[in-house]
Amino acid sequence: MPYDRKYMLEGIQRAAYKRKIPSERIEQIVDEVEEFLVANHEKEVSSQTIGEQISKVLRRVDRVAYVRFASVYREFKDVGDFIDEAQDVIKRSADDVPGQQSLFDEGAES
């Protein structure tokens, strides 16, 4: 199925709601995902592939936005799924961008 830039942008914006991610950075995320899709896929791209790529980029940019996006994209069935993903993000935080705010730090915006 052909991807829709507007749909990707809106999904990322929802995940980034009230996060300190400038709109220019959100546009860059979509650009990065589009570049990946063009470079690595012929004509049709599954929504799963698009969601996975958005997740990879968002995880590097903002872990809270990533977990929000993942909860919709991966269709978490209950709060346990959400908690499991959040714990995984915390556990792997050493691999993430230096200086990224912890998911559960005091003062973290929600």
Image (cartoon, rainbow, N blue to C red):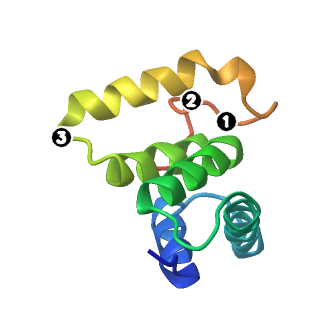
Q: Contact, CB < 8 Å: mark 3 with mark 2? A: no
* Relative to 68, 81 lies left or right: left
Measured Cα–Cα span from mark 2 to mark 1: 7 Å
Q: Contact, CB < 8 Å: mark 2 with mark 1? A: yes
Residue located 43% across and 54% down the image: 48
From the viewer's side, name the closer residue of 75 and 48. Answer: 48
From the viewer's side, name the closer residue of 107 and 94. Answer: 94
Q: Contact, CB < 8 Å: mark 1 with mark 3? A: no
Secondary structure, mark 3, is loop
Secondary structure, mark 1, is loop
According to the picture, the residue beneath numbered tag 3 turns out to be 77
Q: Label 2 sits on what residue type?
A: Asp
Residue located 45% across and 67% down the image: 14
Q: Position of residue 69 (x, y in %)?
A: 45, 53
Mark nearer the N terminus (1 vs 3): 3
Q: Label 3 sits on what residue type?
A: Lys
Measured Cα–Cα span from mark 1 to mark 3: 26 Å
